[in-house]
Image (spheres, rainbow, N blue to C red):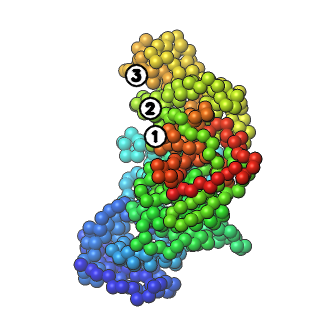
Amino acid sequence: MYKYKPLKEPRSIRLLNLAPSPHNNPGLPLSCELTEVAIGSKIKYEALSYSWDAQKLEFPIQCEGKELLITANCKAALLHLRSRSNRMLWIDAICIDQISEEERSTQVPLMGDVYSNASKVIIWIGESTPDSELAIRFLKDFFRISFKNFFRNFAFNRKLKQLEKADAKAAKAGTSPTGILESVFDRSWFQRMWTIQEVALARRKVVMCGSTTIEWDDLYLGLDTISLRKALGKLSAKEEQTFDSSLACHISFESLLRQRRNTESKLDPPDLSTLLYDARRQEATNPKDVIYGIYSLLLAVDIHLPTPDYSKSVERIYTEAAEKALLQHHSLELLYQVASSRKFPNLPSWVPSFNESRFYYPYRKPTQFACSKSSTPTFELQGGGRLSVRGKFIDKIASCATTVIDWNEAEEFAFMDNIGRDAGFLDLFESHVKAYREWTRMAGLLKSYPTGESVKKVLSRTLVHDRVNRPDSSFYNRNRKWDAESFTEGFENWYAAVTVGTEGHISLEFITAVVDLLPKHNRKSAWKLFNEKEKQDPKKVTESLTYKIAVMLKANYLTSTYTYFVQTRMSGCRFVITKHGFIGTAPPMAKVGDGIFLVSGLSLPMIIRQRENGTNILIGPAYVHGIMDGEKWPEDEAELEWIALS
């Protein structure tokens, strides 16, 4: 078995000299030699970017005559990279002694130099398929076509139609149900944490899928194609979800670096808490790599975290990153990200579990609210994982809904697309209906509201976090059709549908009237939802309450739009009512007895739980209707108290 020789210098790396295959014989065993070189040496090499996919080191290659184990994906990449002459490469699984924590700790800070000095970064996304080969050909073709005045561009429209035919063929064959571009973008490489900085720091990037290659910029322009398809109404919700999560993070960080490179004046470092938020959608096998995987990238934008040290605990690494984020701009906004299942028991409650992509955070930038008015953040880091903030106790949670719409369900449940196409979605919709009915029942128990508004009006605004009918709402400003009157009508229709009698007896005449409200091309599909055998016979109406509510919610634009916002805003939220009769939403882990606090410098109320031993746990941000605009913030801030979070 091959044994690594310790590196002689702290700023040295190993390069892999891959032996050739003179006759391109895939059966010839892989063989290589390792050479130590100093960072910045003039030796030309290519760096490989690929995903480990939690694979084990179990496939042997020959390294200097000894056996060295690598992953299956690494082996596949090497077989395609091997040529008829020697090839100098840098590959982490081979060039770094993965068993040595000490070596990994010293090599990780050098990753920025490794990828930026490489003559080319080869992005290996896996073996090709007929669909992926066809998709890459389409992407190359789209790159060659001018996008100027694309609606009048005959070549573009012709190519778009060809792509649609290929999508239909692939969907029929079951190879790429949402289109052939999925065969490229829906691969694990796009979800891996390390690949973000490997792309952003590289000078030149080539994507390799089997033996097929495409320049990164060509692939990047594939997103333009997707955007155009979206503008033309050709993109399904599933496709949109797949592609939004594929390149968005890579492009965001790459654009950030490009901007700094192209600006002569020195720029201030970007907000660390925002960068950590953006990176949380990516995955890493080792939870420590959620931070270390972008360490070099952060250095490139003048954000200096403690030097990587794999002997540290995950809790310490995350806490150090969180402290840096708080102190960087003297901001507490990182606390909005804390609500999650918290897999690490010793992690302070105010430190996010950065490795969890699923967490309660309904507001990216909650600037439309000001529950603590214009107060400035006041906090103290006290060591030992303790953070003290200034704030005020306002209320307690008195009752919680038992049903929470799951994050995964909300993503899978494309109501606007699937109703009428796939009656199977109603099984998923059942949990949504259960939640809707519980929320309306809980609100109905209130006889009045502290602000003097009607309870129904408060409910209508709470379920969308008051984000679509305020003058400062982005949706309100983008869509003038959605005014206060439209909002009210949409809610009233939604409320009537979800509060239908429990027996579910609705006359055939009423159902017919509802279906007649739909566009003609949707009526046939709507009747299928009421027909157990999916035949166009309105007399065979099922008694399923879910079916009836589904069609009622689809009845017109206003109702379906309000339903859409409820689905997206309430995903992962727990509906709550406070001791003083306020209605709100909280993280799913909130429970009866949790306190509601206003914190200096934060726009949203925070849920804090007091333990029996007197310590406080931060649960996460909340929406409580009636206190979001500073109504409960004290005029005299001397009333504030220090709240210690552990």
Residue positioned 67% across, 31% down in the render: 450
Which of the two discs, 2 and 1, labels the residue nearer the N terminus? 1
Q: Are marks 2 and 1 in contact (CB under 8 Å)?
A: yes
Mark 2 or 3, closer to the camera: 2
Compute the Cα span from label 2 to label 3: 23 Å
Q: What SS does tag 2 mark?
A: helix
Q: Give neighbour class at mark 2: few <14, some 14-19, many 20+ (Cα, 10 Å).
A: some
Q: Left or right of 376: which side holds 556? A: left
**Observer-nearest of 49 and 436:** 436
Q: Which residue is mark 1?
A: 406
Q: Amino acid at mark 3?
A: Glu
Q: Is any atom of residue 571 visible in this view?
A: no
Quarter of the image containing the N terminus? bottom left
Q: Quadrant of residue 453?
A: top right
* Separation of residues labelled 2 and 1 (CA atoms): 9 Å
The numbered mark at residue 534 is 3
Residue 44: x and y in percent read 47, 82
Q: Is residue 280 above or below residue 232?
A: below
Q: Secondary structure at mark 1?
A: loop
Q: Mark 2 = which residue?
A: 431
- Please name the amino acid that badge 1 sits on: Asp
Against 599, is 193 above or below? below
Return the residue nearer the eye: 212 or 478: 478
Query: In the rendered image of this protein, does residue 641 appear above or below residue 98?
Result: above
Residue 362 spot, x, y in % from top left: 57, 45
Residue 286: image location, x then y, percent:
40, 63
In the image, what residue occupies the spot 49% across and 58% down? 348
Q: Label 3: state its secondary structure.
A: loop
Residue 269: image quadrant is: bottom right
- Of mark 2 and mark 3, the one earlier in the sequence is 2
